[in-house]
Amino acid sequence: MTEIKRWHPTARMNQMVAYNGLIFTAGQVAEENAGKSVAEQTAEILRTIDSLLAEAGSDKSRILSATIYLADIAGFAEMNNVWDAWVSPEAKPARATVEARLTGPEYAVEISVIAAGL
């Protein structure tokens, strides 16, 4: 049986779970840049995703799918500017971006990914 591995538990969830060669992150929000611009929040979230994937022995070039939630879809281009500079050009994942009410007004962006392990 394949082991399930979990990282950074909170009262309700884990920040990351791996099973059968796949890595799933929880939706990540900007803590340090909460209330700041879409670009600043996106950059912080992507750094967090880099860090989480590294802990699991993977990296952004192995992301299979990303889901991006924007509090206001008007921030789509601003988020994409940061995303495009970050994503591996030769390994772009499948991606969905939706407008959604996030957990607090200070959050403009939330991102979760599914990646392959190494």
Image (tube, helix red, strand yellow):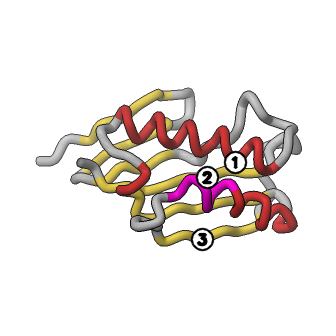
Residues under numbered marks 1 and 2 in contact, where contact means CB atoms less than 8 Å apart: yes
Left or right: 81 as drawn, with respect to 35: left
Q: Is residue 84 magenta?
A: yes
Name the amino acid, label 2: Ile
Is residue 29 in the magenta section?
no
Q: Which mark is residue 42?
A: 1
| N-terminal label among 1 and 2 | 1
User: What is the x, y in percent for residue 117?
Assistant: 27, 49
**Few, some or many residues within 10 Å of mark 3 (<14, 14–19, 20+):** few
* Residue 35 on image: x %, y %: 87, 38
- Quarter of the image for residue 36 reads top right
Look at the image and give the residue range highlighted in magenta. Answer: 82-87
- Predominant SS along the magenta part: helix
Residue that appears at 76% across and 42% down: 40
Q: Which residue is mark 2?
A: 111
Query: In percent of the image, x 47 and y 34: which residue is there?
Result: 51
Report the residue marked by disc 3.
96
Q: Secondary structure at mark 3?
A: strand
| Residue 24 numbered mark, or none | none
Please, what secondary structure does the residue beneath circle 1 have?
helix
Q: Does residue 110 appear left or right of residue 101 in this picture?
A: left
Give the residue type that dot 1 points to. Thr
Q: CA distance from mark 2 to mark 3?
A: 10 Å
Category of crowding for the residue at label 2, using alpha-carbon neighbours closer than 10 angstroms: few (below 14), some (14–19), many (at least 20): many
Label 1 and label 2: CA atoms lie apart by 8 Å
Identify the residue shown where x is 66% and y is 38%: 44
